[in-house]
Image (cartoon, helix red, strand yellow):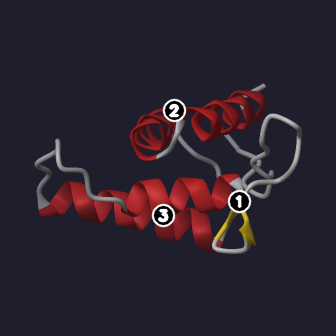
């Protein structure tokens, strides 16, 4: 499955959201989520490495083909990392990418 990682995340009025002055894209949201550490998780080094390698893979080639499992992980972690509007917009882009 290929996702549109360069797609911008927009607010309710359709304006592109910014993070530290940079436009927020699905790529930013995805890599930030994959590299985040969550207080409610106790994951081992293998899982951390898996997430880190996936972030590197996506960042270096946003046109990469992802497995269903990788997309599910990305969605789960975005849901834990961001506020509802960013999650909703990211999920829209992800679900469109799978069509």
Which residue is painted at 72% across and 57% down in the image? Answer: 25
Residue farthest along the front direction in this orientation: 13
Q: Label 2, on which residue?
A: 68
Which residue is painted at 57% across and 45% down in the image? Answer: 66
Q: Residues within 10 Å of mark 1 (few under 14, many from 20)?
A: some
Secondary structure type for disc 1: loop
Q: Label 3, on which residue?
A: 55
Q: Position of residue 69 (x, y in %)?
A: 44, 35
Q: Is residue 32 above or below residue 21?
A: above
Q: Position of residue 27 (x, y in %)?
A: 65, 59
Secondary structure type for disc 2: helix
Quadrant in the picture for the C terminus: top right
Q: Residues within 10 Å of mark 3 (few under 14, many from 20)?
A: many
Quarter residue 50 falls in = bottom left
Seen from the viewer's position, the closer of residues 14 and 71 is 14
Secondary structure type for disc 3: helix
Q: Earlier in the sequence, mark 2 or mark 3?
A: 3
Q: Label 1, on which residue?
A: 24
Which residue is painted at 22% across and 54% down in the image? Answer: 47
């Amino acid at each position: 499955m290929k996702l549109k990682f360069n797609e911008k995340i927009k607010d309710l009025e359709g304006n592109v959201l910014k993070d530290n002055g940079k436009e927020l894209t699905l790529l930013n949201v995805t890599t930030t989520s994959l590299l985040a550490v969550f207080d409610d998780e106790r994951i081992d080094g293998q899982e951390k490495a898996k997430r880190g390698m996936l972030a590197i893979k996506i960042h270096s080639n946003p046109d990469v083909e992802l497995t269903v499992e990788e997309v599910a992980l990305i969605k789960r972690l975005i849901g834990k990392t961001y506020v509802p509007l960013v999650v909703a917009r990211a999920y829209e882009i992800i679900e469109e990418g799978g069509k």
